[in-house]
């Protein structure tokens, strides 16, 4: 018995000394402790009323599972072999979509993070590798699913939308008892201005997005004040007054364009024409 006990003790001593080599030679797999990473931060941002982003910062590579629960609505994130740093304060995190966030350690070293929602949301997750500035990250995007439907526009709103064309008020100069300038052959400025205005109106109304109105459409006198009133009633974006100017040189041809100037006419000829037209 003594010799058997001595031999057994010697065998066990050798096995304990060379146990690792024995295991490797026989193909047995040694057991190593699992590496555990740490959740060091949770960052929450809201880029729009219907979108919230939650970013989890971790110290190493990781695996995760994501699923949703109802009644009440929640998004659950499971991080394998992960523990949460005690420095993270997640008790008062809220956005338009989420009402809070909490975590708990589960069996097997799993960390469960629960995102509580105000209403149902559609989650999407993806992982980011270290980029020199940040470490391993898990990004969870939450998108609202209960957006209010687009309101149906009323008839008045539709009319207002159709009215949003660029309105051009054409103002044919003179008219009625005011003939304006008269040419050598009796051509009257008021007739020329009205004819040109009507042709311009037809051309403008053919263009999409534009509408032309006339301050007078017949040979009648309209005061300057009433011309302005008509343009404002049509909600005109621009007011164009049309004239066939007379000039002291018969060989002058072409057109002249005058824009409103807060400092008065900028040339001698312009001042002469403006004075003549404003006095009629």
Image: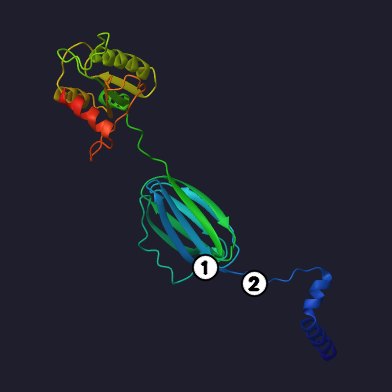
Relative to 21, residue 38 above or below: above
From the viewer's side, name the closer residue of 17 and 279: 279
Helix, strand or loop for disc 1:
strand
The colour scheme used here is rainbow
Relative to 50, residue 34 above or below: below
Mark earlier in primary sequence (2, 1): 2
Name the image quarter holding the C terminus.
top left
| Mark 2 or 1, closer to the camera | 1
- Real-space CA distance between mark 2 and mark 1, rounded to the nearest whole angstrom: 15 Å
Q: Which residue is mark 2?
A: 33
Looking at the picture, how far across and down is residue 129, in whole percent? 59, 60
Q: What's the residue at 84%, 72% (across, down)?
A: 25
Q: What's the residue at 41%, 59% (across, down)?
A: 101
From the viewer's side, name the closer residue of 86 and 170: 170
Q: Residues within 10 Å of mark 2 (few under 14, many from 20)?
A: few
From the viewer's side, name the closer residue of 272 and 29: 272
Looking at the picture, how far across and down is residue 5, in whole percent? 80, 88
Q: Residues within 10 Å of mark 1 (few under 14, many from 20)?
A: many
Q: Which residue is mark 1?
A: 83
From the viewer's side, name the closer residue of 214 and 82: 214
Looking at the picture, how far across and down is residue 26, in whole percent? 83, 70
């Amino acid at each position: 018995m003594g010799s058997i006990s001595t031999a057994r003790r010697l065998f066990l001593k050798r096995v304990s000394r060379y146990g690792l080599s024995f295991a490797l030679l026989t193909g047995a797999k040694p057991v190593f402790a699992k590496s555990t990473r740490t959740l060091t931060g949770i960052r929450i941002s809201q880029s729009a009323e219907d979108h919230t982003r939650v970013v989890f910062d971790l110290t190493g590579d990781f695996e995760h599972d994501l699923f949703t629960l109802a009644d009440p609505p929640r998004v659950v994130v499971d991080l394998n072999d992960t523990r949460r740093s005690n420095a993270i304060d997640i008790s008062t995190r809220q956005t338009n979509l989420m009402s809070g966030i909490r975590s708990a350690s589960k069996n097997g070293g799993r960390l469960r993070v629960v995102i509580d929602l105000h209403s149902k949301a559609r989650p999407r997750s993806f992982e980011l590798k270290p980029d020199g500035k940040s470490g391993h990250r898990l990004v969870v995007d939450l998108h609202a699913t209960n957006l209010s439907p687009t309101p149906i526009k009323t008839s008045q709103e539709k009319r207002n939308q159709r009215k949003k064309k660029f309105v051009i008020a054409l103002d044919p100069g003179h008219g009625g008892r005011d003939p304006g300038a008269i040419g050598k052959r009796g051509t009257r400025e008021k007739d020329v201005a009205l004819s040109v205005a009507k042709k311009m109106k037809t051309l403008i109304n053919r263009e999409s997005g534009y509408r032309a109105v006339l301050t007078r459409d017949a040979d009648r006198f309209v005061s300057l004040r009433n011309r302005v009133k008509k343009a404002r009633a049509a909600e005109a974006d621009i007011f164009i007054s049309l004239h066939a100017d007379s000039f002291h040189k018969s060989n002058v041809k072409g057109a002249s364009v005058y824009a409103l100037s807060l400092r008065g006419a900028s040339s001698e000829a312009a001042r002469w024409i403006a004075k003549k037209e404003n006095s009629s």
